[in-house]
Amino acid sequence: MKALVYERNVARFAATKLMGVVSRPKVAISPLRLIDIEPPKLPGFHWIRFFPRLSGICGSDLATITSNSSRYLEDFVSFPFVMGHEVVGEYQATDGSMKRAVLIPSLTCEVRGIEPRCRFCEAGQPQRCQLLHLGSISRGLQTGFCEETSGGWSQELVAHSAQLFDIPDTLSDEDAVLLEPFACAVHAAMSIGNDLNTQVAVIGSGTLGLLTIAALRAIHPNAEIIATAKYPHQRELAIELGATVVSAASELYRQARTIRSAQMLGPDKPTDGFGIVFDAVGSSSTIEQALKVAAPGADVILIGMPKEQKVDLTPLWMKEISIRGSYAYGNENLAGERVSTFDLAARFSQSIGLSKLLSATYRLDDYEMAIEHALNAGKRGSVKIAFDMRKGHIRESWNQQR
């Protein structure tokens, strides 16, 4: 079968990272290769063969390919691995019929067959699983980073039954391929409680930022959401998905001053600001901006995967700001009800139309063009790029790059 495999190749990794210092690294020199491999073996009784239909290209995938991901994650993967964790596909049910499902890629204690489970999995917080290196499969924080499972950038992978989230016919493949990143956004939005009536800032209107705006509007209908966007199409989508105000990043300092009638000690130093700030980018500049526009005692939530970088933490110390991460999904408390994040994401997605964020799809054969498109999505007026493994696919057939 065809698969996009990321190999442990130190020379290619170094070359990609070095080129990235002076220009955008080329996919061709990265450790990623399209090759023919044997279909993965089923690791155990509860495992099922899963056939991708659409598989998204995530920011963490791009960071891996361009050698910009944190070295901290190196011990949470097993090489070589087939990439791709945002997947909608199909599998054969016990009655012989084919069913569509979205992959829940987390490789938790339940998936690995570990008993007793770690304290986080036992408490219903699988996103914090601490046994990602044990059990019936090799180490890997998610499908798409584990040698034995294969991944969504292929014609076939294997999934534990607990990883398959069945989807209704009312949800198209194009909607469903956004469900996994939307679940990440829902988890982040739920981390600040239910139905808050306050001003919230969202820095960045790429895929994750836009999905966070949608999740905030669904969960906190009375909140005032101030977002930043770099490109016109991002601004339009941010407003459509529920942002109250959308501005350029440089204008966020003024927005922070205005909401509290604060003073400005400099062009980027309001004395007060937002009680909650979501950083959907995770760069040194956006983290520093989040700390500057946050009010004293505020919460700054990182939902974009941070890279290795230098950040001035003085505002965090001086204003007693709490900074925390929001990773993946698990179970949420909604009005006293305990519900899985994916259930909530599916519930909210019915009225949002997630497919509006899917800008173009490519065949696996055209992976270099697909990844180059994803790396330059904002400049090209696009948001989410995906691979399409469905029969008869025509390159960029979906939405023709918005």
Image (cartoon, rainbow, N blue to C red):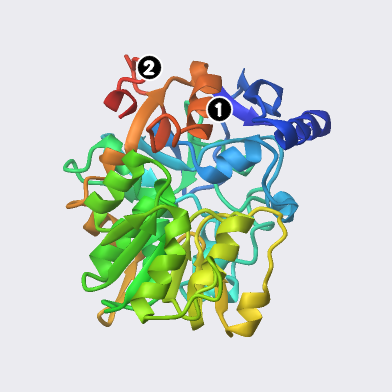
The kind of residue tagged 1 is Pro
* Spot occupied by residue 64 in the image (x, y as percentages of width and height): 64, 40
- Residue displayed at 68% across by 47% down: 77
* Spot occupied by residue 382 in the image (x, y as percentages of width and height): 38, 33
Secondary structure of the residue carrying tag 1 is loop
Q: Is residue 373 above or below residue 145?
A: above
Which mark is drawn over residue 39? 1
Which mark is drawn over residue 78? none
Q: Nearer the viewer, residue 210 or 161?
A: 210
Mark 1 and 2 residues: CB-CB less than 8 Å, in contact?
no
Where is residue 112, by image quadrant?
bottom right
* Spot occupied by residue 75 in the image (x, y as percentages of width and height): 74, 53
Q: Which of 53 and 183 is in front in this view?
A: 183
Q: Crowding near pointer 1: few (<14 within 10 Å), some, many (20+)? A: some
Secondary structure of the residue carrying tag 2 is loop
The kind of residue tagged 2 is Arg
- Judged left or right of residue 123, residue 116 is right
Q: Is residue 349 above or below residue 48?
A: below
Quadrant of image for the C terminus: top left
Query: For mark 2, what is the residue?
Result: 395
